[in-house]
Each structure stands twice: as structure tokens, then as C-alpha cells.
Image: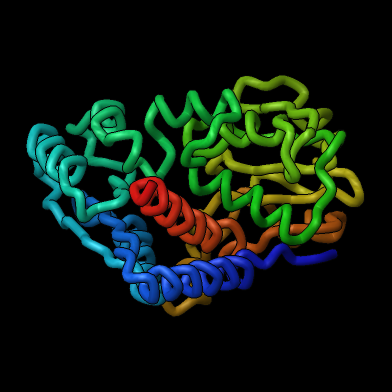
Amino acid sequence: MIILDGKKVSNDIKNEIAEHVKSMVSKGEKVPHLAAILVGTDGASMTYVNAKVKACERIGFHSTLIDLPADTSEKELLENIKNLNADDNIDGFIVQLPLPNHIDEQNVLMAVHPDKDVDGFHPTNVGKMALDLPTFLPATPYGILELLERYQVETSGKHVVVMGRSHIVGRPMSILMSQKRKAGDATVTVVHSRTKNLQEITKTADIIVAAIGISEFLKGDMVKDGVVIIDVGITRVPDPSKANGYRLAGDVDFESVSKKASYITPVPGGVGPMTIAMLLKNTLLARERRLL
């Protein structure tokens, strides 16, 4: 069993981007500038955004954080997005999800200009992705593809089961894995909360991407020997033995599934770091497009 070490691969990618940025600086080019909007004080969101800011500092990007209170109106948020769309100093930006309940998430995602949508969530970019046209790929699926490629995991002709149908991970993952690409050419099945005979389907999978948001849902008796496991989930599970009172768990029961897996991502340290690395890669792409 081989651990798909997202932390190591993401560091490799950051180092590659940092070298590219040094080259840009030596040519007198403006370095990439990533902005992030954070609404409220959700602990996980604050952690993710701070990690993104630190990653920008490490590789030589400029970064801007717009920190808004939880009671910010949708109108105020859209005004901030409008300003970032118009700011030529900003190459790409993200609006950290989830948003407070009083804000319509879809309205917000639609307001981000597709050319600056480095999260890859705008319908224009999702449509281009579906048609296999050049665009910003959603960061988490993009990171999974990169992880599979760098570990040379064979995907061509394999049966991939994607657990979950979210717009952020499940649905784009199913599209990308079926396309003609290095980490692709797979036969894909999407399963979700309404799927019948779920275990029968997962036991036929050569590769499973678990993104359903239920901690340790996928058990060892649900997979076959030699399966490749990509665990996207991350949940805080109460654990009195820990100083902070919890541990982080994925959607996969690592203890039982890892005994059968040929490759598996850990939680934490698997998909999470890759998401940030690919966001940076998308921002670099946005900057290069603006230089054309």
C-alpha cells in the first residue's frame, strides 16, 4: 500500500511555481496577485484562507485578504466582488465558501468574472471544463488529477466510482476522469444518497473518489483488493484523548480500507494541500493569460 502524499506533492508544486515567479521577476514582469474574500468567522474557512495567504507569501505571490463581518449584506459582498473584477492589480480571486445563510451563494459565484475565477466555479468555466476547453479547473478535482499523474496511477480503462455529486468536487471529478487526458480515459459511475445497492457498485471500483461529507463512511468490506482510494472528506470527530478534543477524519475508514488499497490518500495531508497548490497554479495561469 502506497500513501498518496498530498503534502509532499503540493510542496513540489509550490517550489516549481516559486521558481517560475523568480523567472518572471528577473524579466521585470509583474508577479501574480491572488485575493480572497472571507465573510464571517467560520473556523475552518479562516484556517483555509490563512493557509492560502501563507502559501502566496512562500512562493512570491502578492495576496490580499478582504475580511468581512458575518452580517455583511449580499449587496455589500457583490460590491466588493465588482471592485476586484475591475482591479487590474488582481489576477484572480476567490470567495471562501460556505457563506452565511442570508447570502445567495449562486448569485455570488455568478458575479465573479470568469477570467479571475481561479476557483473554477463560474458557469462559463464549468462549461468550458465539460467541453474540454482551456479554462480554470476546480481546484480540488484538479489537485486529485495532479496527484494521480505524479504517482503514475493508471486510470485508462479503469472503473472510477465518484461518491458524491457536489458542484465543487463530485460532478466535475466525474467529467474530468472520463475525458481524454493522462489521469482520465476512465469509465465513471457517480453514486450518491439515492443510489441503491451502493456496496455492490463500490466493490467493482478500481478507483474510488469519496466526497460525500460523512466521516469514515466507506468501510473495508465495501471495496475490493488493490483499489485506489482518494479521500476528499474532512470532518472533526470528537476525541477526548486529543488536547483539542477532536481528531480529523475523512470519508474513508482508513484503518479497514487501507488494508486492501494499493494507493490511498491520508486525512489530513492528502487532498487538502493539493487544493491550495492548484489554486496557486490557476492564479499563475490567470496572470500569464493577462500578459498575452
What's the image's color scheme?
Answer: rainbow
In the rendered view, tell whether residue 27 sits above or below residue 282: below
In the rendered view, tell whether residue 212 sits above or below residue 35: above
Could you tell me which residue is drawn at 67 percent across and 56 percent down? Answer: 147
Quarter of the view holding residue 176: top right
Which of the pair 127/225 is nearer the observer? Answer: 127
Q: Position of residue 187 (x, y in %)?
A: 79, 28
Q: Position of residue 157 (x, y in %)?
A: 87, 34
Which of the pair 242/1 is nearer the observer? Answer: 1
In the rendered view, tell whether residue 237 sits above or below residue 138: below
In the rendered view, tell whether residue 262 sits above or below residue 170: below
Q: Is residue 147 left or right of residue 247?
A: right
Could you tell me which residue is drawn at 58 percent across and 56 percent down? Answer: 271
Q: Position of residue 183 (x, y in %)?
A: 73, 44
Which of the pair 284/56 is nearer the observer? Answer: 284
Could you tell me which residue is drawn at 71 percent across and 63 percent down? Answer: 4
Q: Is residue 261 left or right of residue 214?
A: right
Which of the pair 288/111 is nearer the observer? Answer: 288
Residue farthest to the bottom? 243
Quarter occupied by the N terminus: bottom right
Could you tell me which residue is drawn at 82 percent across and 34 percent down? Answer: 159
Q: Could you tell me if residue 177 is visible in this image?
A: yes
